[in-house]
Image (cartoon, rainbow, N blue to C red):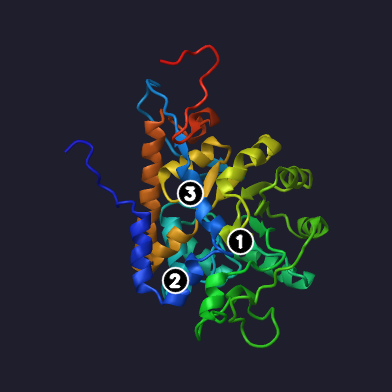
């Protein structure tokens, strides 16, 4: 039948329900939860629901592609896997399964500093599927410079092609669900493997073994002097910080409110994106994450100034329910959903999506000057 779906069904809400039924309650809450009353967590998704896409029509040409260029590499689609912690809470294969699935689908992966698999093993798993797989390493600057240095060297030796420096965490957010559950330690046999040998005593097994502290721009400059890897700043929401970051020589920005897990009063990532895009004015690439669940979310992010959008929790739901195959199917379905939305918006390439195609849902949009209403 013409138009019949042949690929995997894209069902983010159903995937979360199935994952919740399989996971231990405290592990589900660790992954699903946010800070405080979880306002920022909800707003990440709700903000997309307040936006609509104005399609363009009769644009001609059947040829269409989803590839984008980011930091000198070509990506199969404007989509990446955002850093999330402790994948082995979701599935025994953990980050290895995630890395294989991301590589198999051509999706760049940002592996977390708080991973339950060492960065060298994550990169090796990805490159076994695709020798050209893009893997970046997410880094929290540590108060001991020698610890930061050791982490950077591990990422370099592993073959990571960028460092994603999370800068929105001078302290831990109040994770209400974790406090209620008394969830502080990983199960026996699991650890934050990238911190092994870098902390006193046994391998780190607590959920807060990685220090969060108020780093400054001087610390970022020290990091810049430490490595030749591109630096991507993650957690930038204020346009003034975006301008300063560009002046400091960062290579890209990732607009993010940490999945709603830090400041509960923070705006949704997609709401902060336009002002950051205006401040940056195309001088460095912008990425964003937070609340991305469907192809239209990716399209909205691109129209508002991002070159790619990241998914976090959906990866873990797919991992919990289907392992490597589940993650691969989810990423494939999301990419296909974006491709369909791109076509329905009249676009041939991701860069065809523009800010004038984004309007508030349920409200009359402003008409171009001189155009009459019915």
- For the point 44% across and 35% down, the residue is 362
Within the image, what quadrant is residue 203 found in? bottom right
| Above or below, 25 relative to 364 | below
Q: Please say if 54 is above or below 214.
A: above
Q: Report helix, strand or loop for mark 1.
A: strand
Earlier in the chain: of badge 2 and badge 3, it is 2
Mark 2 vs 3: CB contact within 8 A: no
Residue drawn where x is 55% and y is 57% of the image: 39
Residue placed furthest toward the left: 1
Name the residue tied to disc 2. 28
Residue tagged 1: 137
Which picture quadrant has residue 337?
top left
Rendered position, 3 above or below 150? above
The label shown at residue 46 is 3
Which-is-in-front pick, marks 1 and 2?
Answer: 2
Distance from Cα at disc 2 to Cα at disc 3: 21 Å
């Amino acid at each position: 039948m013409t138009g019949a779906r042949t690929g995997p069904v894209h069902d983010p809400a159903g995937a979360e329900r199935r994952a919740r039924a399989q996971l231990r309650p405290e592990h589900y809450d660790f992954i699903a939860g946010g800070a405080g009353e979880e306002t920022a967590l909800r707003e990440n998704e709700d903000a997309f629901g307040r936006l609509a896409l104005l399609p363009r029509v009769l644009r001609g040409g059947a040829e269409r592609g989803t590839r984008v260029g980011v930091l000198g590499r070509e990506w199969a689609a404007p989509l990446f896997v955002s850093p999330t912690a402790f994948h082995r809470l979701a599935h025994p294969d953990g980050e290895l399964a995630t890395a294989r699935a991301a590589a198999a689908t051509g999706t760049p992966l940002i592996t977390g500093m708080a991973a339950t698999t060492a960065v060298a093993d994550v990169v090796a798993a990805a490159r076994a599927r695709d020798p050209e797989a893009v893997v970046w390493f997410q880094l929290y600057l540590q108060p001991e410079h020698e610890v930061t240095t050791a982490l950077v060297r591990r990422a370099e030796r592993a073959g990571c092609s960028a460092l994603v420096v999370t800068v929105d965490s001078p302290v831990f957010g109040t994770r209400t669900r974790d406090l209620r559950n008394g969830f502080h330690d990983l199960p026996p046999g699991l650890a934050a493997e990238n911190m092994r040998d870098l902390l006193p005593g046994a391998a780190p097994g607590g959920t807060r073994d990685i220090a969060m502290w108020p780093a400054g721009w001087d610390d970022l400059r020290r990091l810049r002097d430490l490595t030749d890897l591109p630096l991507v700043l993650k957690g930038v929401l204020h346009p003034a910080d975006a301008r300063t970051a560009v002046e400091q020589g960062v290579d890209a920005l990732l607009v993010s409110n940490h999945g709603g897990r830090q400041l509960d009063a923070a705006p949704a990532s997609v709401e902060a994106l336009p002002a950051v895009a205006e401040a940056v004015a195309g001088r460095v690439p912008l990425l964003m994450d937070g609340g991305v669940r469907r192809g239209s979310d990716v399209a909205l992010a691109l129209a508002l100034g991002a070159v790619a959008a990241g998914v976090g929790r959906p990866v873990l739901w797919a991992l919990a329910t289907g392992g490597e195959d589940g993650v691969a199917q989810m990423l494939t379905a999301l990419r296909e959903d974006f491709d369909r939305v791109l076509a329905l918006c009249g676009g041939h390439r991701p860069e065809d999506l523009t800010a004038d195609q984004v309007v508030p849902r349920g409200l009359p949009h402003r008409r171009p000057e001189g155009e009459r209403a019915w």
